């Protein structure tokens, strides 16, 4: 059990009634995982690795705008969480590549659905923001 939720995935109807509320508690360990996975760069790194292993520079090229420092920190965090594997091939210089672990693959499948939804609806969200901003102009905050 982790925050009242069984560790093995269960169908939603088999979870205790209060299990969903536990992840909202600030002391729930799942909150740390949620933070790592749903961070701006975490989502992009995980979905970027969905197509297969990549070297550091390949991943950085794929994820435009990420700094070396942020990519390095994000990869370290995801490796520590057991979602990404770091493989070092002995050569000169050493060849390092990153790939999803089975745990990371299981997580990335639903993340890709979210990613696709965001991509497909980004223009609608932007239009809604513009309508909101236009209505809000001149109104006291």
Image (cartoon, rainbow, N blue to C red):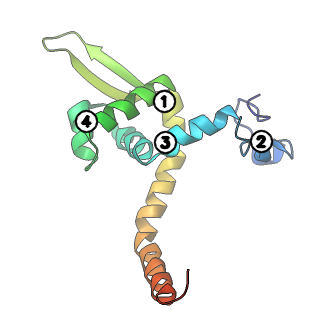
Mark 4 to mark 3: distance in Å? 22 Å
Q: Earlier in the sequence, mark 4 or mark 3?
A: 4
Asked whether 65 or 111 is in front, the reply is 65
| Left or right of 129 in this view: 20 | right
Residue on which disc 4 sits: 68
**Residue placed under numbered mark 2 in the picture:** 22
Q: Residues within 10 Å of mark 1 (few under 14, many from 20)?
A: many
In the displayed structure image, the side of residue 82 where residue 11 appears, left or right: right
Q: Are marks 1 and 3 in contact (CB under 8 Å)?
A: no
Q: Position of residue 85 (x, y in %)?
A: 40, 23
- SS type, badge 2: helix
Helix, strand, or loop for circle 3? helix
Outermost residue, right direction?
17
Measured in 3D between alpha carbons, the distance from the residue under mark 1 to the one under mark 2, in whole angstroms, is 23 Å
Q: Is residue 86 above or below residue 14?
A: above
Real-space CA distance between mark 2 and mark 3, rounded to the nearest whole angstrom: 23 Å
Mark nearest the camera among 2 and 3 is 2
Q: Earlier in the sequence, mark 1 or mark 2?
A: 2
Residue displayed at 42% across by 69% down: 122
- Residue wearing tag 1: 83
Q: Residue 121 location in percent, x, y?
A: 45, 70
Label 3, on which residue? 108
């Amino acid at each position: 059990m982790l925050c009242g939720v069984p560790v093995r995935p269960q169908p939603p109807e088999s979870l205790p009634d209060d299990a969903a509320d536990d992840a909202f508690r600030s002391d729930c360990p799942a909150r740390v995982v949620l933070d790592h996975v749903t961070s701006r760069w975490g989502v992009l790194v995980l979905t970027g690795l969905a197509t297969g292993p990549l070297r550091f520079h390949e991943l950085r090229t794929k994820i435009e705008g990420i700094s070396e420092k942020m990519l390095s920190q994000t990869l370290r965090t995801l490796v520590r969480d057991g979602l990404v594997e770091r493989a070092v091939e002995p050569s000169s210089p050493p060849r390092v590549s990153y790939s999803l672990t089975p745990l990371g693959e299981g997580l990335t499948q639903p993340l890709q659905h979210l990613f696709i939804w965001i991509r497909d609806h980004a223009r609608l969200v932007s239009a809604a923001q513009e309508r909101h901003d236009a209505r809000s102009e001149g109104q006291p905050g």
